[in-house]
Image: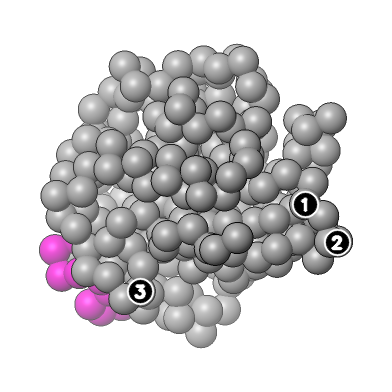
Amino acid sequence: MAEPLRCIARKSTKGRSRAPLLFVHGAFIGAWCWDEHFLKYFADLGYDTWAVNLRGHADDEETEDLASVDDYVADVLLAVEQIGAAPVLVGHSMGAIVVQRALRRSRARAVSLMAPVPPHGLLGSSFMLAAHSPEIFNEINRMQIFDGMTGSTDQLRRAIFSKQLPVADVKRYMRRMRHESQRALYDLSWPQHFWIERTTIPVQVIGAADDLFFPQPLVVEAASLHGVEAEIVPDMAHAMMLDVNWEQAAQRLAAWLERALR
């Protein structure tokens, strides 16, 4: 089977896939974030793994500033169609909203939401960040205006990664970050309840204990919408799939998959 459009794919090393996993990245980043650790980790556990580049997020693409969250949903649905089997959807941050909005049409077997944008949208959490960490809020806006990192990574590092992550890795990751579609950020600013709903398929919600973007109460809010308990991973910040303790989050996901796919 040909690889889906704008996807990175890693086949199961066990010969047969237990279920396909489709990973959906968040804002300012691309599918590469999953390929650092997660795709191989889950391929070695027996899953075919895929990570979709939402439009305008591949390294060789320009950001599409008019791309909407609905456009990103369409990208996920196209990836599901080309995978050819009902997947488990794993969405991080903005990607968690995208997969929730894709659930009705995706035929997904289960969904895991990592550090999700809360159901009430970005506006409230942005005000909280501006009030409690104005320097980080300003750096995010600079990255959006100037299309990526333009100076010191010290402030954003506190929000995105734990302090244990080596500086060389922080700089390498941040060089690959880009500004996000302004239309998509606008779409995410408002309450998302109209587009997402409780589902009958298994749902997991994972948060990071040191996440300054979406602290634990906001992760609990996302979990409550689906009637599940939030799992909070200690000693981790927002970008769980890239952090030094990434395997802790991967293990939580792997254990849940064992239960959800029985």
Point out the residue furthest to the bottom here.
Answer: 168
Q: Quadrant of residue 123?
A: top left
Mark 1 residue type = Ser
The C terminus lies in quadrant: top right
Q: Residues within 10 Å of mark 1 (few under 14, many from 20)?
A: some
Asked if residue 236 is positioned above or below residue 243 in the image, the reply reads: above
| Residue at mark 1 to residue at mark 2: CA–CA distance | 7 Å
Q: Secondary structure at mark 2?
A: loop
Residue nearest the observer in this picture, 248 or 58: 58
Q: Position of residue 92 (x, y in %)?
A: 49, 46
Determine which of the numbered discs, if any, sits on residue 17 in the image. 1
Q: Of the residues tagged 3 and 2, which is closer to the observer?
A: 2
| Residue at mark 3 to residue at mark 1: CA–CA distance | 28 Å
Q: Is residue 218 left or right of residue 227?
A: left
Residue 36 colored in magenta in the image: no
Mark 2 residue type = Lys
Q: Position of residue 230 (x, y in %)?
A: 62, 29
| Residue at mark 3 to residue at mark 2: CA–CA distance | 30 Å
Determine which of the numbered discs, if any, sits on residue 14 in the image. 2
The magenta span reads 144-152
The N terminus lies in quadrant: bottom right
Mark 3 and mark 2 lie on one chain; the one further toward the N terminus is: 2
Q: Which residue is mark 3?
A: 59
